[in-house]
RNA sequence: UGUCCCAUGGUGUAAUGGUAACACUCCGGUUUUUGGUAUCGUCAUUCUAGGUUCGAGUCCUAGUGGGACAACCA
């Protein structure tokens, strides 16, 4: 007997259907992006939900491009979406396009007209909007609502052939202008658009609207459960109405169910808003490491596993939510802790001189790559007389809570020797420029000597200056200064952009860095996780800081 | 002046009429050649008021609060 794990409400819906109306083989899901932008962390949740269900029930999951609007959609986005879904580690059963169903949708529309369920309206969009009423006020019928079937057919044919100018006519479903659900007030199902479509070119001059397309696409693909976000809940009535008009009762009837979109703190998760950040130059592009896009997170150094674990870990519900970004950071630390090799780099250097170490000597010491992974092995790091350590790791004097280097006291240099600070040199402004230390020759890490086993409270990372590599390091902070930048009543979210979200510095790294390639992930010992950016050249390596280590010392300070 | 959805620690999600739990965060202890990791622990939760019931976070009613709906967007 296995433990009964708790089910989320989506899984409960499926389990119940499995008991009553559906067979296991009936299950089929889909992820339906519109190819008009890049996928972001919110989509990742939806991807993990749908593809996760596919894995759980061993059911197919289609990747369906909802490409009904040629004005916005592009092949570039199709490619990017496929790349992102694959990168997350999911395989779709069939690559589908709503545009593949244009003919079927058209045939059904003709049927609707013949049944008296649809009519051509020849008013302006303003007039139609006017007659639609408001949420609290019912609509009124269009003067064209009762055109004859013949006239409707004729006009619709003209729309299709491009004989009517854009905007002259639309096809509307004839439902109920008095409905409390505004979507049921004779929704537009076709508009004329004389634009080239990324897949159908200029074949079609009429394009179906979302509501008319989505449910019927689900039906064509025999999707059993069509999961979407809460804002589509009022669309469900229409979804069902359309299905009722065209359904063959021997076939499976798709059902739409809704879950709450998952919001991430300190960022925005809306394609339109993300596009503004790109257009207004706040970030360098859709894959800027500060962006919550899949490609941005990837460039930042997030692993697919960390994103999938994040999405699965937060669950799914129906309430408005704002997930703290620290939850995302936790999941990438958790994953990288197991995977990333430890290396040493100094980002804010101060020089250390080991006064009792020979001038010309360089020792190549063994350093363990990852204590969390026995198979990770060892590498060599050079040690010599002049080193860099972090400025903040030295104080002339400090209380005993400061475990680092101070005058007269000892620290361990990671993978190397125990040193003691004896003296320091300062510039005219009183800044420390050199620290003079002596080392304990018998204290080499791993040498097994008594001196090497001594317990010293502090351990510092360091690099030998002579062998050090200069690297560019890009440090990131939250893109917005407030948790929820886009829910403010009066202020535009752009007013909350953090002006200090990027800091570019030069750091110094141990020679083993030469072995790293773009997208490789490492832990800069004691600092955080970093990944090699694609801007890296043979001249200069560029690193992105993915996330810092937890830092209980920083909190103490 | 409407219809619909939602309400559990700081955050997110469980508990399916029967002891309110898990994760993150926060705080503290232990271990540690990363102030990391691991590990142990502390604090903290059912919006309000009625009702049904032996028993209500769960069911019902009302209230309060939050959200959605008036694109030829998806």
Image (spheres, coloured by chain):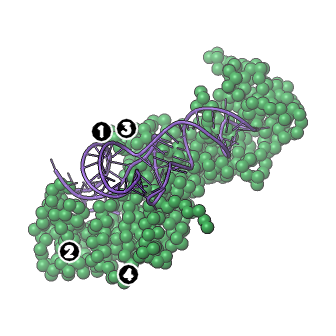
Q: How far apart are marks 2 and 4 (CA)?
A: 24 Å
Is A242 left, or right, of A428 in this rendering? left
Q: Residue at x 46, y 77 (%)?
A: A23
Q: Which residue is the site of mark 4?
A: A251
Q: Which residue is the site of mark 2?
A: A118
Mark 1–mark 2 CB contact (< 8 Å) = no
Circle on res. A495:
3
Mark positioned earlier in the residue sequence (4 or 1): 4
Q: Which chain carries label 3?
A: A
Q: Residue furthest left?
A: A143
Label 3 crowd (10 A; few <14 / some 14-19 / many >=20): few
Q: How far apart are marks 1 and 2 (CA)?
A: 41 Å
Q: Which residue lies furthest to the bottom in this view?
A: A250
Seen from the viewer's position, the closer of residues A281 and A241 is A241
Q: Distance between the residues labelled 4 and 1?
A: 50 Å
Percent x, y of residue B44: 48, 38
Seen from the viewer's position, the closer of residues A313 and A86 is A313
Q: Mark 3 or mark 2: which is in front?
A: 2
Mark positioned earlier in the residue sequence (1 or 2): 2
Label 1 crowd (10 A; few <14 / some 14-19 / many >=20): few
Give the chain coloured green: A
Mark 3–mark 4 CB contact (< 8 Å) = no
Percent x, y of residue A271: 39, 53
Mark 1–mark 3 CB contact (< 8 Å) = no
Seen from the viewer's position, the closer of residues A515 and A189 is A189
Label 2 crowd (10 A; few <14 / some 14-19 / many >=20): many
Give the chain coloured purple: B
Q: Which residue is the site of mark 1?
A: A490
């Amino acid at each position: 007997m296995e433990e009964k794990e708790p089910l989320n409400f989506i899984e409960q819906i499926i389990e119940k259907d499995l008991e009553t109306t559906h067979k296991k083989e009936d299950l089929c899901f889909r992820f339906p992006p519109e190819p008009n932008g890049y996928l972001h962390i919110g989509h990742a949740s939806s991807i993990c939900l749908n593809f996760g269900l596919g894995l759980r029930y061993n059911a197919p999951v289609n990747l369906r491009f909802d490409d009904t609007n040629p004005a916005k959609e592009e092949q570039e986005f199709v490619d990017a979406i496929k790349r992102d879904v694959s990168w997350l580690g999911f395989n779709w059963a069939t690559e589908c396009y709503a545009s593949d169903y244009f003919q079927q949708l058209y045939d059904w529309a003709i049927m609707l007209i013949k049944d008296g369920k649809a009519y051509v309206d020849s008013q302006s969009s303003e007039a139609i909007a006017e007659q639609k009423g408001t949420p609290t006020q019912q609509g009124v019928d269009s003067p064209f609502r009762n055109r004859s079937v013949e006239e409707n057919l004729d006009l619709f044919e003209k729309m299709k052939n491009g004989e009517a100018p854009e905007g002259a006519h639309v096809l509307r479903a004839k439902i109920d202008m008095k409905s409390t659900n505004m979507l049921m007030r004779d929704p537009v199902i076709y508009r004329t658009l004389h634009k080239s479509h990324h897949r159908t070119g200029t074949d079609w001059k009429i394009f179906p609207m979302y509501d008319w397309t989505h449910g019927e696409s689900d039906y064509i693909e025999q999707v059993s459960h069509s999961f979407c976000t809460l804002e589509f809940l009022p669309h469900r009535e229409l979804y069902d109405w359309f299905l009722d008009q065209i359904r063959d009762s021997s076939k499976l009837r798709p059902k739409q169910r809704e879950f709450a979109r998952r919001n991430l703190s300190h960022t925005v998760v809306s394609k339109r808003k993300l596009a503004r950040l790109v257009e207004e130059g706040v970030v360098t592009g859709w894959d800027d490491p500060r962006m919550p896009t899949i490609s941005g997170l990837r460039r930042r150094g997030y692993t697919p596993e960390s994103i999938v674990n994040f999405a699965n870990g937060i669950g799914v519900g129906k309430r408005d939510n704002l997930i703290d970004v620290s939850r995302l950071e936790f999941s990438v630390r958790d994953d990288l802790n197991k995977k990333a090799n430890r290396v040493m780099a100094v980002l804010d250097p101060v020089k250390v001189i080991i006064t009792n170490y020979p001038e010309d000597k360089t020792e190549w010491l063994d350093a363990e790559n990852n204590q969390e992974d026995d198979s990770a092995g060892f590498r060599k790091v050079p040690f010599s007389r002049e080193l860099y350590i972090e400025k903040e790791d030295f104080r002339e004097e400090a209380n005993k809570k400061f475990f680092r280097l101070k005058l007269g006291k000892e620290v361990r240099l990671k993978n190397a020797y125990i040193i003691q600070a004896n003296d320091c040199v300062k510039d005219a402004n009183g800044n420390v420029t050199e620290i003079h230390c002596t080392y304990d020759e018998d204290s080499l890490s791993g040498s097994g000597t008594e001196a090497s086993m001594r317990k010293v409270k502090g351990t510092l990372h360091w690099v030998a200056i002579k062998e050090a590599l200069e690297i560019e390091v890009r440090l990131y902070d939250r893109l917005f200064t407030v948790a929820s930048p886009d829910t403010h009543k009066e202020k535009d979210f752009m007013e909350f952009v953090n002006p200090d979200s990027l800091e570019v510095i030069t750091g110094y790294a141990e020679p083993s860095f030469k072995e790293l390639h773009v997208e490789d992930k490492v832990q800069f010992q004691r600092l955080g996780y970093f990944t090699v950016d694609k801007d890296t050249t043979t001249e200069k390596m560029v690193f992105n800081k993915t996330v810092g280590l937890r830092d209980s010392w920083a909190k103490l300070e």
